[in-house]
Image (spheres, coloured by chain):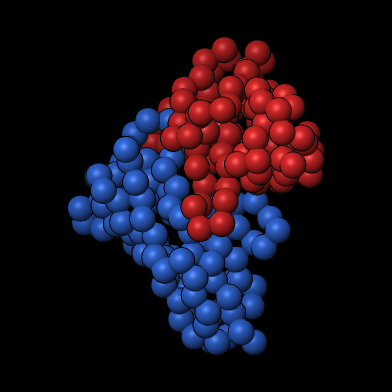
Chain colours: A red, B blue
Amino acid sequence: DVKVTQSSRYLVKRTGEKVFLECVQDMDHENMFWYRQDPGLGLRLIYFSYDVKMKEKGDIPEGYSVSREKKERFSLILESASTNQTSMYLCASSLGGQPTYEQYFGPGTRLTVT
Amino acid sequence: GQQVMQIPQYQHVQEGEDFTTYCNSSTTLSNIQWYKQRPGGHPVFLIQLVKSGEVKKQKRLTFQFGEAKKNSSLHITATQTTDVGTYFCAGSTGANNLFFGTGTRLTVIP
């Protein structure tokens, strides 16, 4: 069964802290994605990766960085958390190539920055 | 940049009524996908449309892709309480990423 897991369901951090969100997929997918979901704004792409050590900026990369050292793992890093980064963070993975394959999502991490 | 607009943002229907959500893209899409997110859950893939004018059905759900490949719709016939959730369209221009619409949150009143 397809599986995408995220390190935490809920996380509370203080302003200025460095935050790591981890995502692991067991489907040998080439592509991995990080989104944030806010009410009324849908899913907005932060970063995606189409291969190990490769990354591309999405629509809202400011304040975030990512790391993909292994194919199955994609990390999102908030270098210095701010209150406007309070949100639901969703990781997803998909096969590579075209047409774009369906994305499989993890359960999400609800991050609160105080 | 790429935008996919989705309307309405919210829809409340009586159980048994029909429901439709619409997506419009500012650019021509290579394909469009639809996802459903149950309350408290994560988005789950429903279907993908690739061809111009394509229509696909899944039981009470009918998905359409416009002739110009710039718009799409999802129609649910005779809604049930199990249909509640947020429905997202997501368009692709051929690269490896998708552009998600803002979603339509469906509430079904028993």
Count of marks overlaid on the render: 0
Q: Work out which residue is located at the far left of the displayed protein and give it.
A: B68
Q: B51 above or below A56?
A: below
Residue B52 visible, this orientation = no
Say which of B64 and B12 sits in front.
B12
Residue A99 coordinates in the image, percent (x, y)? 39, 36
Q: Residue at coordinates 49% horizontally, 75% vertically from top-left?
A: B11
Quarter holding the N terminus of chain B?
top left
Q: B100 above or below B81?
A: above
Say which of A7 and B1 sits in front.
B1
Q: Residue at coordinates 46% horizontally, 31% vertically from top-left?
A: A58
Q: Quadrant of residue A80 in the image?
A: top right
Residue B57 coordinates in the image, percent (x, y)? 43, 65
Quarter holding the C terminus of chain B?
bottom right
Q: A24 above or below A101?
A: above
Q: A74 above or below A12?
A: above
Q: Quadrant of residue B2 in the image?
A: top left
Residue B98 coordinates in the image, percent (x, y)? 43, 40
Q: Is residue B40 left or right of residue B28?
A: right
Say which of A53 and A76 sits in front.
A76
Residue B94 visible, this orientation = yes
Residue B71 coordinates in the image, percent (x, y)? 29, 57
Q: Residue at coordinates 51% horizontally, 58% vertically from top-left?
A: A40
